[in-house]
Amino acid sequence: MKTTAKRTKQAAIEVTETVPAEAAKEEPVVTVEAKKKILFVASEAAPFIATGGLAEVIGSLSKAVAADERYDVRVILPLYQDIKKEYRKDFRFIGNIFVPLSWRNQYCGIFEYEANRVKFYFVDNEYYFKRPGCYGYYDDGERFAFFCRSVMEILGFINFYPDILHCHDWQAALAALYLKTIYCYRPEYQFIRAVFTIHNIEYQGKYSLDILEDLFGISYRYKNLVEFDHCINLMKGAIECCERFTTVSPTYAGEIKDPYYAHGLDQIVRRNEFKLCGILNGIDPDYYDPATDKALFANYNAEHPETKAVCKEELQKMLGLPVRPDTPIIAMISRLVSHKGLDLVKEVIEQVLRQDVQFVLLGTGDSQYENYFSGLARNYPGKVISVISFNSDLSRKIYSGADLFLMPSKSEPCGLSQMIASRYGTVAIVRETGGLRDSITPYGAGGNGFTFSNYDAYDMLYVINEALGVYRMKDEWARLMKKAMETDFSWSTSAKYYEGLYLGMLK
């Protein structure tokens, strides 16, 4: 007996022909190879609505996994008021259901949109989501409980029961909790495997235990899953319930076992570390491409970086800085909050400014830092520019026009800014923590940037001075800039790790 196998890529069909010697003309047996079904549950996603790195991860990771024809990838999001109209006009209403949430029975409209082989669903309820922004409301617990319960209820309506339910951050944590408690007795839900990704362990979803049943609709017999430090902790509940949980970089996966980084959850992480792994985030190399980015003053690439000098000159003109091609520009694009290492910058920045440098900062945040950097710009006219704003277009111009990018974070689960800066040929100076350590390697060891390990202002100052010294060696700087631009920060590698995680869970 002879057996052969053929694969038709377009239809993902495996044809097996069994040909006995006496019956060579038998019809082949045809079996359809089922796609693995992945459902992402998240509170935001690019390009529809974004407040930070989470949105970019959901938009890029889903696209990268869906590029493999073995996967059917879908994403569920709330239908916020602020979702961009250019996309919203193309959403298709596919129906509505009513969602039980404790004693409530709430309307839930369902909209659909497809792009890059990914199908997106949007949960509509104007009481919860017809408001400016995504977060920061007194009833956020109820809003995202409704969202997560809607996810569970929608599966039957769209006839899509995923193999993997991938939940992101505390806003989606209840989807995993509902799956393993309320819905675990329903046959169609019993084989769904859950993954929970921690993007920032600082934000855990903490609420009073008094509202477990009344607000979240979870029986007190499950109290042990979510109770931590005498309150509900939704992130803790998701860690306990999921088959696997991940962080957004390998180093951060190790750091959150330490009380210094874990914001109280280190004992829960250590108890569950047998199901923990860290996978480094990536960026979309098509979206962040200096060769095609329309926001830039001029386009360039790693092979022909000459016109990056035009971006620098035009940035200096735009910001009112003296046009000096040989004066290095050190840039920061950041939320102005303490864990971004701004206290280190405050301690030594004036020593840096005694040299022939220019410093550009873009960001918003705590008033103490906004006031400090605004005052610094007034004290150093022609050397310092502080733009206290969130401005996506200007950020692209800074990434392309600066020479050095400073990111001295106290903690950084992954960080995308250092990757974007490198992609645009702006060499990163980072502290070795979280994803910064995993993405930027030290120049002295043949790496793509400059790093320091201790959270110390003078260690940072030493490395800044080292970077300025290399900048003055033009040939060496050109080589380093090219290396930074050619570093592979794409999702292609990270997506393979996620695919391996998913397939391992399904064995």
Image: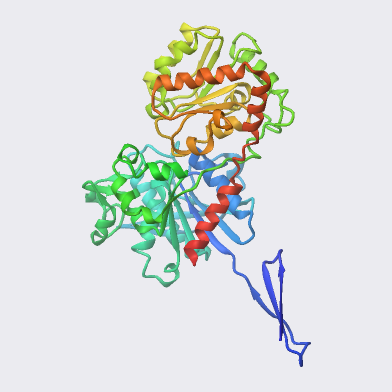
Give the farthest residue toward the right: 25
- Count the numbered circles shown: 0
Residue drawn 33% across the image and 63% down it: 181
Query: Residue 51: x, y in percent?
Result: 48, 36
Which quadrant is the N terminus positioned in? Answer: bottom right
Query: Residue 287: x, y in percent?
Result: 63, 38
Give the farthest residue toward the bottom: 22
Query: Residue 172: x, y in percent?
Result: 41, 50
Say above or below: 2 vs 69.
Answer: below
Task: Say if residue 484 shows up in the picture.
Answer: yes
Residue drawn 44% across the image and 42% down it: 251
Say above or below: 375 vs 182.
Answer: above
**Front residue (pair 78, 166):** 166
**Front residue (pair 207, 34):** 34
Query: Residue 70: x, y in percent?
Result: 61, 62
**Front residue (pair 432, 285):** 432
Q: How is the protein colored in the picture?
A: rainbow
Task: Say if residue 81 shows up in the picture.
Answer: no
Q: Seen in the image, is 314 located left or right of residue 94?
A: right
